[in-house]
Amino acid sequence: MPEAPVPAPSARQSPAAPAMIRPTRMLSAKTLADPRSKQARADLEAFASDERMVQLCNLEAMDQIRQWRADFQPERVVPYATAEEKITGTTIAADGAAFRSRKNWYSLKFKCQLAQDGESVIGFEFLVGDPVARDKWDELGLPAVH
């Protein structure tokens, strides 16, 4: 009697990874256009191209998280908390990011697509994870205060 074929590992049922949130409206341009963002605009102009793109994506992440859940008040994003962000052309993938809200850090994953000139966000998706344990903050370079 022939043996039944063993299913390939990819065919086994595994828990589905949480779906990324894909906003349809980008928010960072509106934030930067606000007169109160004058200093942020000046700071962005001083950065080198890659760093400017990362900072734009960090701003987009904070705006999108705030829009998604009002109980989060993101004030800072560290895109390389547990893994270096990857910049490919005008796309930034930050699988090991973290953001601070209300004196706590939370894990974050995001993918950010910028316009060809790298000056504006045209696509963004993100996934908020669990709180980062306080005893890991120093190790990950996550400051307790500004």
Image (tube, helix red, strand yellow):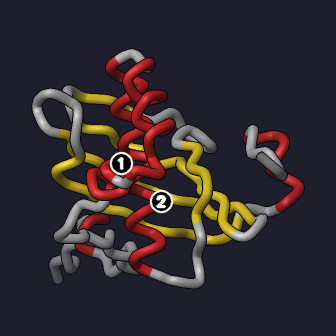
To which residue does mark 1 refer?
A: 32
Q: Are marks 1 and 2 in contact (CB under 8 Å)?
A: no
Q: Name the outermost residue toward the right.
A: 135
Residue corresponding to mark 2: 62
Q: Is residue 30 left or right of residue 107?
A: left
Asked if residue 14 shows in the view, the reply is: no
* Front residue of 57 and 21: 57
Place of residue 11 in the rendered image (x, y in percent of width and height, measured from the top left): 23, 72
Is 38 rendered above or below residue 34?
above
Q: Residues within 10 Å of mark 2 (few under 14, many from 20)?
A: many
The residue depicted at 27 percent of the width and 51 percent of the height is: 29
Measured from the top left, where is residue 42 in percent x and y?
A: 44, 28
Instruction: Give the vertical position of 67 relative to 105 (above or below).
Output: below
Closer to the camera in the image, 84 or 74: 74
97 shown above or below 84: below
In this rendering, is residue 13 above or below 24? below
* Foreground of the two, 75 or 40: 40
Q: Return the residue found at the far left.
A: 116
* Residue 82 visible: yes
Pointer 1 or 2: first along the chain? 1
Secondary structure found at label 2:
helix
Tell me the kind of residue under disc 2: Met
Residue at x 32% of width, y 19% of height: 49
Horizontally, is 136 left or right of 21 in the view? right
Task: Characterize the local packing of mark 1: few (<14), some (14-19) or many (20 or more) Cα atoms within 10 angstroms.
Answer: some
Quadrant of the image occupied by residue 23 = bottom left
Instruction: Where is residue 79? Give x, y as percent.
Output: 52, 42
